[in-house]
Image (cartoon, rainbow, N blue to C red):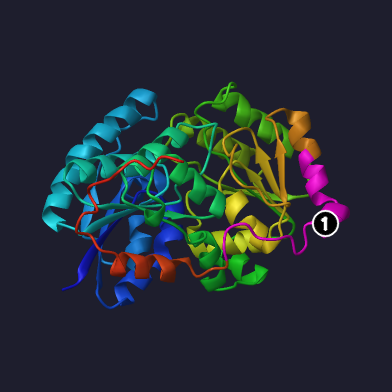
Amino acid sequence: MNRKICIVTGTRAEYGLLHHLMKRIIHEPGLELKLIVTGMHLSPEFGLTYKEIEEDGFVIDEKIEMLISGDSTTAITKSVGLGVISFADALERIKPDILLVLGDRFEIFAAAQAAMIMRIPIAHIHGGELTQGAIDDAIRHSITKMAHFHFTASEEYKNRVIQLGEQPETVYNVGALGIEGIRKTKCMDIVELSESIHFQLEKFFLVTLHPTTLEGSSSEIQIQNLLKALDQFPNYQILFTKTNADTDGRIINKYIEAYVERNPDRTRVYTSLGQVRYLNAVRHCEMVIGNSSSGLLESPVFEKPTINIGIRQQGRLKAASVIDCSFSIDDIKAAIIKGLSASFKEEIKSAPLLYGEGNTSEKIALILKESKLGNILLKKFYDFK
């Protein structure tokens, strides 16, 4: 009898990471994939990206509408509550053997809460990491305490999960799914990419800025400063991808859209590029700018500079290609100048990768298939001796 693995995805970025793992589970004898799609995937505002999942050939078993209109803290809190209620119904219908979730989004937090109370074993990917500038940190560690299997992206993150009291035999350093995604994604030359996005690319920056929920300055000031810094580089095109559904996300998107309207010859904004186009945009860009985790995980594989702004990713492992800076206009400008320099580009060539070699899906699928579930719900706290 096949073991039912239920995956939850709520964002385009998360699906991009899970894509190859989902395929692996489908083709792994003894495993059966069940898929719940929620959050931004179902929102017209964020591009109805569930359609991309269906176009990739996956069957969606449940669609859970949980986003309350608005991006205030009150709206997000209500969305979590609605999500818990809806996930309870969906999990009751699917009856999975294991719920498999990735990361630290509030949609995933809701799914994990429902599964925990319903006594469904939980497997968590990307635990043990730190993003000290966002509430994601608390969500991620909370999911760790609810989970029964832990798939971390590095040895340091594995040790941190154990430090949180998880039994060492349930914690596996499998590397990052993003590295595997790069290895398996179709390469597009810059002409193909330009045709695909209907914009003739030359020298360009790839920019993604998410709200930093715990940073001192407001999202409005942060995006204004970033755009003013980008004004200092008029000879470079800019591809923006829109932010996620976090608090203040709409503010950031509003400023980006207005900026693109004022600079139509050299800028474009996309709700979602999709995994293939996004990774190829990283491949061909001059640098990645913003505060997305992709700048830390995927960009170093392409030996591309990352300008990591603010504290959103504070605490994560960073390759030599990552340049940290504050949200001040001068700091952002100086970081971009450094990233464009020939000496820095030479310095980051062949720098060691921090997140595995690209066989993460195979490792996770085999562990999910072969692990015994008999007493898995009886968690014991692990104390360092």
Which residue has dot 1 on it?
Answer: 347
Q: Position of residue 199 (x, y in %)?
A: 62, 59
Looking at the picture, does residue 358 appear above or below residue 376?
below
Identify which residue, 319 or 242, lies in the foreground: 319
Looking at the picture, does residue 8 appear above or below residue 77?
below
Structural crowding at the residue carrying mark 1, measured as other residues with C-alpha within 10 Å and reported as few (<14), some (14–19) or many (≥20): few
Going by the numbered disc 1, the residue's amino acid type is Glu
User: Residue 374 falls in which quadrant of the image?
Assistant: bottom left
238 vs 98, left or right, is right
> From where the camera sits, is residue 15 visible?
yes
Task: Find numbered disc 1 in the image and state the secondary structure of the residue it sits on.
Answer: helix
Q: Position of residue 160 (x, y in %)?
A: 50, 43
2 vs 180, left or right, is left
Q: Residue at the spot x=22%, y=46% of the render?
A: 115
Identify which residue, 377 or 284, lies in the foreground: 377
Q: Residue at the spot x=30%, y=73% of the render?
A: 26
Which residue is farthest right? 343
Q: Where are the magenta residues, as a range?
A: 335-356
